[in-house]
């Protein structure tokens, strides 16, 4: 049987490179998940994140089925990497979480070594 993650996985090509993503319409086509396509975009972003991190989510199918039925009042796991917010002056600021910042520092160190 194919997992939810594999069923929703899609790829596209741009500029000679291949990219992967998780399709909400593809996930909504699975039995019991038809309501996912009608979710607000904010919840669809969280669903895509849950599909991407499927190995870290306990009982992913049950959470997605509850969301598709429109249930409320449950905890939804998420993995923020960047957060856009406004500072005290109202200027937008991009906040990079520690996990992303660490990854970027490692990549920069590797690039410096190769130069």
Image (cartoon, grey):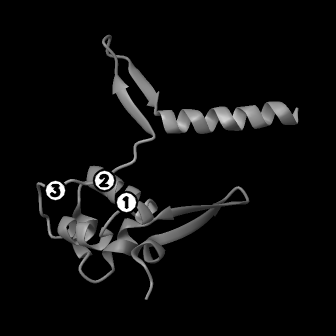
Q: Position of residue 20 (x, y in %)?
A: 56, 63
Labelled disc at residue 77: 2
Disc 1, SS: helix
Residue that numbered label 1 is attached to = 50
Disc 3, SS: loop
Q: In this orientation, which residue lies closer to the viewer: 27 or 6?
A: 6
Callout 2–callout 1 Cβ contact below 8 Å: yes
- Please give the name of the residue rendered at 30% of the width and 12% of the height, measured from the top-left corner: 88
Residue that numbered label 3 is attached to = 74
Residue 78 in the figure: left or right of residue 35: right
Asked which quadrant contains residue 23, the reply is bottom left
Q: CA distance from mark 3 to mark 1?
A: 14 Å
- Please give the name of the residue rendered at 53% of the width and 38% of the height, measured from the top-left corner: 100
Q: How many marks?
A: 3
Quarter that holds the C terminus: top right
Q: Position of residue 29 (x, y in %)?
A: 33, 79
Mark 2, other Cα within 10 Å: few <14 / some 14–19 / many ≥20: some
Disc 2, SS: loop
């Amino acid at each position: 049987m194919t997992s939810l993650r594999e069923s929703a996985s899609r790829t596209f090509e741009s500029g000679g490179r291949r990219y992967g993503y998780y399709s909400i319409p593809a996930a909504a086509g699975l039995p019991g998940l038809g309501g996912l396509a009608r979710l607000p975009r904010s919840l669809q972003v969280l669903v895509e994140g849950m599909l991407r991190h499927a190995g870290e989510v306990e009982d992913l199918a049950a959470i997605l089925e509850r969301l598709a039925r429109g249930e409320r009042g449950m905890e939804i796991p998420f993995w923020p990497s960047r957060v856009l917010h406004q500072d005290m002056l109202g200027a937008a600021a991009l906040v990079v979480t520690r996990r992303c910042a660490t990854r970027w520092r490692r990549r920069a160190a590797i690039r410096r070594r190769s130069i």
